[in-house]
Image (cartoon, rainbow, N blue to C red):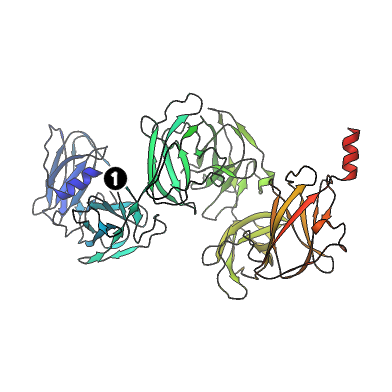
């Protein structure tokens, strides 16, 4: 695509020894028409006549065609009226290809200066992106750091990037990701000034190899994600397996994907089971983090078809995920137009689930289970294909609403709203920045509950919602009260080992149990409670350990009440002794 930039700056006429032509009409006339081969290299260009007619002489092959205005009054047009070079239609030219007509519209100008601090930067690429994410056009800054880019009227996101990777890519106005950048409106025959800033890049470099043979792996896509899970930049490994990423200083997780060959399973650096558990890298601006290497295992494949469970027709665009034993996501893909999907995973055992981001169908776990716990684990070996693993999806209903702060009425972001049936969570969604949420669930009656995993707000119940297929239950709204965050850990009294699966109980002043939490693998727990006086206990559902109240009290009466205030925090620690009956059983064994 660098050749596209050169073509926009000069008028070149290349006449190969040819046996094919591309012809048509350009409006207005006297524009330059260019054909690019399958590699994106300029093959030939010519100026159209004043009446717009043109002919390009080419060798037989595939070409993309565009027309541009050297004076920069009209915006470039990509055949057949595509929004970018990459999305333009390739032409299979074997003889005379006619009626390849293009129309240019009067453009608007994006202009400004690219600086690093107070210093202007020449030879920096400035690109305008459509809101769909495709690149509409690009140019380079001159010796004074100035740029000028002509685009059709519309809204764009503008970025500056450095092909030498000395400086990190930044979108206007100085943000690292496309998603965070605001759109810039452009009007015909008008100039919009967009000053751009770039910062010294932090570099992440390494190599990618096969885990078994240690052979270098080429064309592996390496992506850096920020703390919000948004892709900041990506690169591909070369023939020697080496890669290099340039990012603003910050915190990143890396993924390695065999997107082209589809042979090696993805890696979450350095070798985590999921994206969320990947190690976070924190390179500083100007720093080079080297030897960030990855070894990739030849994966196995899960394959199947997604169909409408009522009509039997294939369903496209359904997300299919493979889950590790702990419930974390190992891999995700999307069904194609025929409803077919392929999941590439490392050798192992996984549960599979299918989800409709369009919220027309309820989620389903393999084989035809509504909840994750009911799914059957499926094993796969290296290079093995396990199929068919099919899903029949049922139309669902949708539950939506808004969650707000009870006191301030401000929207609450990051809370979870879930639909429960007989105490089992069937479907849920997290609230967005405006407090809104929406999810799909199978037809049925549900208790809809809002809870906050970040322990800011007290759990609240909306009550029962009856949902029919295809129906919408709207205005299922919540006003959450601020609570007190209670967290802590549970350990074995004698050895100090962390204890998982222990239930932490919260009792009100009258001795009624009103809340509980279960310790994780590291012995930690957390929940949120309303303001008031509370007593706490730790109990083992498996009766291996004796129940203990807070501060090692032996009973509710002896336990010290703790007064909690809204917005406050309390840290608890329990050390549990081995239960006498459990000790006797161990001795007998």
In this figure, what is the number of numbered marks?
1
The image shows residue 112 at horizontal and vertical percentages of: 24, 61
**Considering only vertical position in the picture, is 589 above or below 113?**
above
Task: Name the spot of residue 216 as percent of width and height, x first.
Answer: 42, 28
User: In this rendering, does residue 312 appear at all?
Assistant: no
Quadrant in which the N terminus appears? top left
Residue 13 spot, x, y in % from top left: 11, 42
Reading the image, the residue beneath label 1 is 163
Q: Is residue 190 above or below residue 82?
A: below
Q: Residue furthest left?
A: 50
Hey, which quadrant is residue 51 in on the image?
Answer: bottom left
- Position of residue 149 relative to residue 331, above or below, is below
State which quarter of the image contains the C terminus: top right
Q: Is residue 107 left or right of residue 396?
A: left
Dot 1: within a 10 Å radius of its alpha carbon, few (fewer than 14), some, or many (20 or more) residues? few
Image check: 163 left or right of 220?
left
**Residue 312 x %, y %:** 56, 45
For this rendering, which residue is in front, 124 or 59? 124
Give the structural element (helix, strand or loop) at label 1.
loop
Residue at 88% in and 64% down: 557
Left or right for 579, reference 168: right
Q: Along the horizontal axis of the image, is 276 left or right of 8?
A: right
Is residue 280 visible from the viewing direction of this image? yes
């Amino acid at each position: 695509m660098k050749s596209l930039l050169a073509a926009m700056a000069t008028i070149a006429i290349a006449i190969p020894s040819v046996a094919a032509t591309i012809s048509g009409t350009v409006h207005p006339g006297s524009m330059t028409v260019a054909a690019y081969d399958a590699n994106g290299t300029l093959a030939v260009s010519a100026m159209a006549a004043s009446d717009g007619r043109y002919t390009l002489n080419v060798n037989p092959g595939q070409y993309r065609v565009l027309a541009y205005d050297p004076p920069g009054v009209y915006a470039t047009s990509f055949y057949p009226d595509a929004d970018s070079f990459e999305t333009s239609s390739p032409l299979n030219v074997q003889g005379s290809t006619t009626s390849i007509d293009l129309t240019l519209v009067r453009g608007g100008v994006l202009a400004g200066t690219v600086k690093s601090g107070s210093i202007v930067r020449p030879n920096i690429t400035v690109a305008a992106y459509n809101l769909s994410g495709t690149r509409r056009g690009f140019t380079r800054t001159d010796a004074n750091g100035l740029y000028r880019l002509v685009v059709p009227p519309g809204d764009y996101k503008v970025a500056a990037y450095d092909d030498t990777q000395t400086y990190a890519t930044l979108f206007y106005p100085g943000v690292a990701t496309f998603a965070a950048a605001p759109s810039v409106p452009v009007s015909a025959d008008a100039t919009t000034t967009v000053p751009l800033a770039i910062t010294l890049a932090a570099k992440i470099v390494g190599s990618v190899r096969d885990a078994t043979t240690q052979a270098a792996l080429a064309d592996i896509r390496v992506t850096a994600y920020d703390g919000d899970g948004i892709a900041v930049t990506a690169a591909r490994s070369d023939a020697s397996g080496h890669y290099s990423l340039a990012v603003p200083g910050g915190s990143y997780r890396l993924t390695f994907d065999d997107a082209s060959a589809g042979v090696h399973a993805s890696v979450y650096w350095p070798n985590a089971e999921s994206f969320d558990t990947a190690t976070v890298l924190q390179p500083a601006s100007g720093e080079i983090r080297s030897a960030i290497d990855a070894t990739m295992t030849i994966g196995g494949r899960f394959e199947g078809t997604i169909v409408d469970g009522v009509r039997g027709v294939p369903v496209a665009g359904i997300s299919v995920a493979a889950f590790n034993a702990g419930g974390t996501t190992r891999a995700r893909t999307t069904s194609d137009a025929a409803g077919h999907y392929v999941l590439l995973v490392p050798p192992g055992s996984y549960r599979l689930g299918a989800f409709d981001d369009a919220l027309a169908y309820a989620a389903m776990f393999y084989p035809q289970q509504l909840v994750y716990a009911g799914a059957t684990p499926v094993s796969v070996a290296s290079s093995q294909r396990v199929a068919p693993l099919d899903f029949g999806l049922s139309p669902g209903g949708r539950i939506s609403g808004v969650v707000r702060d009870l006191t301030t009425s401000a929207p609450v972001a990051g809370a979870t709203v879930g639909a429960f049936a007989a105490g089992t969570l069937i479907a849920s969604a997290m609230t967005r920045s405006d407090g809104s949420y929406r999810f799909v669930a199978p037809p049925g009656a549900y208790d809809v509950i809002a809870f906050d995993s970040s322990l800011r707000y007290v759990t609240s119940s909306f009550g029962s919602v009856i949902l029919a297929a295809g129906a919408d239950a709207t205005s299922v709204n919540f006003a959450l009260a601020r609570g007190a965050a209670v967290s802590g850990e549970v350990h074995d009294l004698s050895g100090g080992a962390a204890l998982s699966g222990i239930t932490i109980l919260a009792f009100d002043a009258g001795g009624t149990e009103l809340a509980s939490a279960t310790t994780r693998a590291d012995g930690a727990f957390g929940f949120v409670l309303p303001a008031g006086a509370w007593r706490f206990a730790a109990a083992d559902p498996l009766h291996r350990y004796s129940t203990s109240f807070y501060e090692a009290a032996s009973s509710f009466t002896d336990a010290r009440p703790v007064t909690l205030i809204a917005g406050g925090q309390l840290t608890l620690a329990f050390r549990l002794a081995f239960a006498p009956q459990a000790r006797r059983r161990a001795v007998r064994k």
